[in-house]
Amino acid sequence: MEKIFSRPKALKDNPLSYCPGCGHGIIHRLVAEAIDELGIRERTIAVAPVGCAVFAYDYFNFDTTEAPHGRPPAVATGIKRTNPDKIVFTYQGDGDLAAIGTAETIHCANRGENITVIFVNNANYGMTGGQMAPTTLIGQVTETTPFGRDPLREGYPIKVAELLANLEATKYIERVTVFDAPHIIQAKKAIKKAFQNQVEGKGYSFIEVISHCPVDWGKTPLESVKWVEDVFLKTFPLGVIKDTTK
Amino acid sequence: MVKKLVKGNIALCEGALAAGLDAYFGYPITPQNEVPAYMSNKMVTLGKVFVQAESELAAANMVLGACATGKRAMTSSSSPGISLKQEAISYMAGMEIPSIIVNVQRGGPGLGNIAGSQADYFQAVKGGGHGDYHLIVFAPNCAQEMYEVTYEAFDIAEKYKNPVMILSDGIVGQMMEPVDFNKEQKTSFSKKDWCLDGCKDREPRSIKSLLMGDGALEQHNLDLQKKYEVIKANEVKAELYQVEDAEIIIVAYGISSRISKNAIKSARTKGIKAGMIRPITLWPFPTEIIKKYSKPPVKFLTVELSLGQMIEDVRLAVNGVSSVDFLGKAGGGIVSDKDVLNKIMELKK
């Protein structure tokens, strides 16, 4: 019998340490599939963040390095500039990319580094137990916004994708989500294109993946999916935000 | 070979280039600005990598990324900037990434001033960042040595998979001196079986400092300590100047050693037997060498452009066997050779 579905070569056969219902497992798989399909696994170097995906190097089956919190874009710059033949990507959460690493994120994009950024936005600091993230929604209750995020006290959720789209050097920016099959298929397309751009030397690509975090949101997986659809995406609408690669 | 008159900072750049530098990542701060300016021209002309980073943090992390792939990369800064780089330095020590960090020291604490200083000894030698780790720390005292030490630093960093700091100061960095650029351009490098260069025909590699498994981090620390012991045994470098008959031995590094040498010469003309132990490596520290010369009536005098940092290591080495006095100035002030001579004469009484 022909086997038509199996583990991507770019994913190790290790049990994931992510919480039940978490979106990271799906996103890891999409990245791995894209890398396999483009045949770039043996020349890929990934930069893991600090946060839930810090263990990415236990799951991805290619070369990976750790980076200090928020610094993956700088580390990726060092790798890519000295190894232009390698495929370099960062995999970062909202705290890493949009709070402590804001400067690195913006300046890496502004230099137009020929890398791929996978930004997993789940509106909270998952690894540390669900504190407010820069992308936490107005009114959202977290460990550190027990009364809900109040814009007068905590400001508004940062839309990094839209911010980066204003920079001349960025080439391709899309926001996707992974809560159901049609959206997963679209997310895969976007992620693959973001890697394809790098292979073709087109420049900086940024994919924001709206992901679900049932455990830290205090919701069941099904409630989480519904919350993404009904609430999260209202603040972070899906779609291509910028594409100058055509 | 004809010597060229250059600033210490430029000599340092030439040492790095001759060592086969692949990438320089920097950020403007006085008194090291000659380094990024010179590199911005040289590296681009040579078809190599130069990036003026958005911050000291980013520059240090770019070095981390480049060196994780086995390339030769460096960053340079001055004291306040080096504080910002400590995050990446601690990571590189933990991840065992060989890299070069240059500190052209200025007065502190805080923003301080832009005068040459030696107040970052503790930071360079005792840690600086978090965790149980050591940098290999070189302290060149002239432009020629800026060139030579930097040239060798890359090989030593790679040999031990450890970050190396070159602890210079604003005076050595800015002073123009004749330099003999006598080193051969390095073109062949040892194969690195640990670096990230794509997993073609091999298992994937990961470089990290996060070790969550039971006992894994303790074991990693024990392994690091073993490495540090080997470095201590093999890499201590010091210059001994007229120590054999000396009754007063100055311990001084970098620019302080130049000032002290003049004072020693003057003291000798007055019949005072003074000498000097000059650490060229501050870590590993020449503890055994100092210990060897510690015996009464020999007196030690530590001279630093700080209010006393290296003196703690001198005291540990001497271990109460001889007296250890101190002469120093803080905040970018300079000790003159006359000050040192007066102190020598005071000790001679």
Image (tube, rainbow, N blue to C red):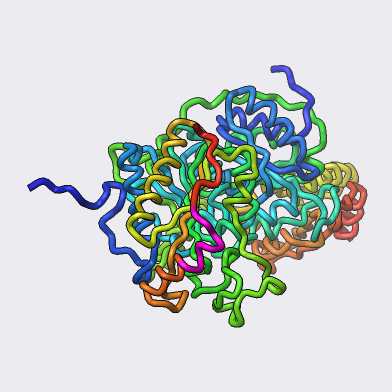
Q: Residue furthest top?
A: B1
A240 in the magenta segment: no
Residue B134 visible in the picture:
no
Q: Is residue B148 left or right of residue B346?
A: left
Report the number of discs. Answer: 0
> For the point 45% across and 70% down, which residue is it?
A227
Q: Is residue A227 above or below residue B242?
A: below
**Left or right of residue B199: residue B172:** right
Is A12 above or below relative to B216? above
The N terminus of chain B lies in quadrant:
top right
Identify the residue shown where x is 69% and y is 56%.
Answer: B83
x then y, percent, for residue B252: 75, 51
Please provide the residue range marked out in magenta: A230-238
**Residue at the image point whose x is 68% and y is 49% from the top:** B56
- Looking at the image, which residue sits at the far bottom? A147
* Image coordinates for residue A53, horizontal then vertical, percent: 44, 60
Above or below: residue B218 compared with residue B125: below
Q: Is residue B163 left or right of residue A54?
A: right
Q: Main secondary structure of the magenta part?
A: helix
Quadrant of the drawing holding the C terminus of chain B = bottom right
State the residue in front, B20 or A71: A71
Q: Can residue B309 be seen in this snapshot?
A: yes
**Would you place residue B16 above or below residue A46 in this image?**
above
Q: Please provide percent x and percent y for residue A115.
A: 50, 41
Coordinates of residue A47 in the picture (x, y in percent) = 47, 50
- What residue do we see at 17% from left, 48% from top? A4
**Which residue appears farthest toward the left when viewing the image?**
A1
Please tell me which residue lies in front, A139 or A11.
A139
